[in-house]
Amino acid sequence: MNVFPDFGSLGGIGELKAVIGAALTLVLIVAVLMIIVSAIIWAVATSTGNHAVASKARGGLLVALGAAALAGAGVAWMNWLIDLGGQL
C-alpha cells in the first residue's frame, strides 16, 4: 500500500510553497546576520571585560545557530517524514 499526500488537490498550493520558501529564506538570512552580530558583540564585550554582555551575546549566538539549523533542516525533515509515512 502506497500512501502519499495529494498536494495537487489543494487550490493555491504553488503559492503556498513559494511563501514558505521565501519565509525559510528570510529566517536563514536573519539567523546568519544574528550569528555575525552576536559574535562581534561577544568578542568586543569579552575584550573590554564586560562579562554580562558577553554571556548574553553568547546566548544570542546559540539561539541564532539553533534557528538556522532548524530552518535549514526543516525541508529535509519534512521530506523524511513524508517518506516514512509512505513506508507505514
Image (tube, rainbow, N blue to C red):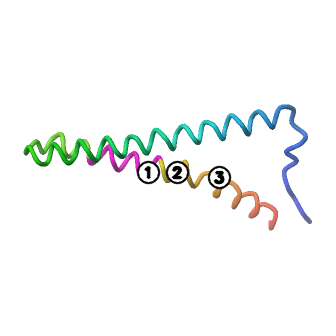
Q: Position of residue 86 (x, y in %)?
A: 82, 63
Q: Which residues are magenta?
A: 58-67
Asked whether the beta carbons under mark 1 and mark 3 sit within 8 Å of each other, the answer is: no
For label 2, the residue is: 70
Q: Residue at x 38, y 46 (%)?
A: 63
Q: In the rendering, which numbered label is found on residue 66?
A: 1
Q: Position of residue 85 (x, y in %)?
A: 77, 60
User: Who comes first in sequence, dot 1 or dot 3?
Assistant: 1
The amino acid at mark 3 is Val
The amino acid at mark 2 is Leu
Q: Residue at x 74, y 35 (%)?
A: 16
The amino acid at mark 1 is Gly
The C terminus, quarter of image: bottom right
Q: Residues within 10 Å of mark 2 (few under 14, many from 20)?
A: some
Q: Position of residue 12 (x, y in %)?
A: 83, 32
Asked if residue 46 lies left or right of residue 4, the reply is left
